[in-house]
Amino acid sequence: MQAATAAVADIVRTLTPWDALEHSHIAETLRWLSESDDIFRRVKPATPPRHLVSYVVLVDPNARAVLLGLHRKAGLWLPTGGHVDPGEHPLTTARRETVEEIAIDADFTVIGDTPLFLTITTTVGIGLSHEDVSLWYVIRGDRGHEYALDPAEFTDQRWFPLTTPELPATDPYFDRFRAKLTATLHL
């Protein structure tokens, strides 16, 4: 196992699963990491067919709200983030994507600089489908502050309370992330 893959495996091993599905995603990710070092997207959109993503969720813990953007390509309300570059540490990706997509430095003081959540999602977009193994990082934001999401990536943005009963179309696992985040913030 190459050093970059081993670093990702170390991160994944620290995660405490929220539910049986996250437990299975963690186990599958660890199996995948033990079998391959080809874990970083090399060619858009789907080479290799499974690769790493760092989601970066901007959270106002006082307002109990998250900022989502309407993603141009996906047509979904998503957190910021992006693909982990070859050899890049996922935390470095989270920092880089925060600067690129929100134009701020990432502040990891909500829960720390390790991901809160892990998902494996089949992504069907323009071209070939593929699987994103996503590490969900949480960064601090302020609902009263104006953020300008990257217009090349997002057409709109909106704060959503963590208690919103139904969100518009979003990541298929966002409700589970929201539940885990809410429980974590109540500790």
Image (tube, grey):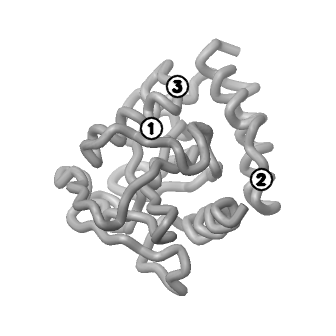
Q: Decide which of 102, 62 is in the foreground and name it.
A: 62
Which residue type carries mark 1? Answer: Ala
Instruction: Report, in whole angstroms, how far the alpha carbon at label 1 lies from the one at label 3.
Output: 9 Å
At label 1, counting other C-alpha atoms closer than 10 Å, the crowd grade (few under 14, some 14-19, many 20 or more) is: many
Instruction: Report, in whole angstroms, how far the alpha carbon at label 1 lies from the one at label 2.
Output: 21 Å
Residue at position x 46%, y 71% in the image: 63
Which residue type carries mark 2? Answer: Pro
Q: Is residue 107 visible?
A: yes
- Residue located beneath label 3 in the image: 89
Secondary structure at badge 1 equals: helix
User: In the rendered image, which quarter is residue 66 located in?
Assistant: bottom left
Say whether marks 1 and 3 touch (CB < 8 Å).
no
Secondary structure at badge 2 equals: loop
Quadrant into which the C terminus falls: bottom right
Give the residue furthest to the left.
Answer: 151
Question: Nearer the N terminus, badge 1 or badge 2?
Answer: 2
Which residue type carries mark 3? Answer: His
Question: Nearer the N terminus, badge 2 or badge 3?
Answer: 2
167 to 110, vertically: above or below: below
Question: Which mark, by number, is residue 94?
Answer: 1
At label 3, counting other C-alpha atoms closer than 10 Å, the crowd grade (few under 14, some 14-19, many 20 or more) is: some
Q: Decide which of 104, 56 is in the foreground and name it.
A: 104
Say whether marks 1 and 2 touch (CB < 8 Å).
no
132 to 166, vertically: above or below: above
- Residue located beneath label 2 in the image: 17
Q: Position of residue 116 (x, y in %)?
A: 63, 49
Instruction: Report, in whole angstroms, how far the alpha carbon at label 2 lies from the one at label 3.
Output: 21 Å
Question: Which mark, by number, is residue 105?
Answer: none
User: In the rendered image, which quarter is residue 148 located in?
Assistant: bottom left
At label 2, counting other C-alpha atoms closer than 10 Å, the crowd grade (few under 14, some 14-19, many 20 or more) is: some
Residue at position x 57%, y 24% in the image: 38
Question: Nearer the N terminus, badge 1 or badge 3?
Answer: 3
